[in-house]
Image: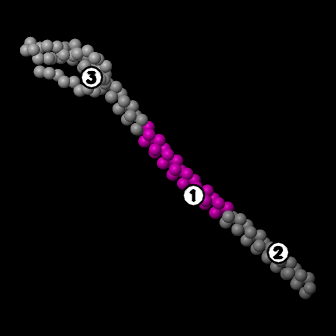
Amino acid sequence: MVLILPRRIAAFTGSHASWETQGKDGSSLPGRQSYEELERQLKEVFKERSNILHQLLKTSKELQGIKVNLQSLKNDEVSIKNEVQKLLELGQNQREMKSLQEAFQMQLNEAAEKAEKQQATA
């Protein structure tokens, strides 16, 4: 029985030593130490992979939170713009009402003056 290691695993381990020993029947078998070393290295790789996945998940959740916050800020911005627009319209209406009030007051004053003149001449 021959153990064939993928090049990636062999390259990852950084080991150039042979992991194979001769079996009783003359076939090449991996040694126990080689298996244990390989198992240890694979455990390290999977532990690192797990840590990376955990960090990616955490980052993904943080990014999702940022996305939600940005959308909320955009919604707030739209709402604020609408409120500012309403305030500007109210301000314009208030100015128009004041202008109308002043015009009515002037007409009332003129009518009062005319009435006084008519009473004075009568």
Which sits in the foreground, 84 or 30?
A: 30
Which sits in the foreground, 83 or 51?
A: 51
Q: Main secondary structure of the magenta part?
A: helix
Q: Does any portion of residue 42 appear in the rendered image?
A: no
Name the element at disc 2: helix
The picture quadrant where one finds residue 28 is top left
State the CA–CA distance, disc 2 to disc 1: 40 Å
Q: On the rendered image, what quadrant is the C terminus found in? A: bottom right
According to the picture, the residue beneath numbered tag 1 turns out to be 82
Residue 7 x %, y %: 26, 26
Q: On the rendered image, what quadrant is the N terminus found in? A: top left
Name the element at disc 3: helix
Residue under the point 77% across and 73% down: 103
Badge number at residue 119:
none
Residue under the point 19% across and 14% down: 32
State the CA–CA distance, disc 2 to disc 3: 104 Å
Chain part drawn in magenta: 62-91
Q: In the drawing, does residue 81 fall left or right of residue 28?
A: right
Identify residue type, mark 3: Ala
Tell me: residue 65, above or below residue 28.
Answer: below
According to the picture, the residue beneath numbered tag 2 turns out to be 109
Identify residue type, mark 2: Asn
Which residue is outermost to the right? 121
* Mark before the other along the chain sequence, 2 or 3: 3
According to the picture, the residue beneath numbered tag 3 turns out to be 10
Identify residue type, mark 1: Asn
Q: Does the magenta stretch include residue 70?
A: yes
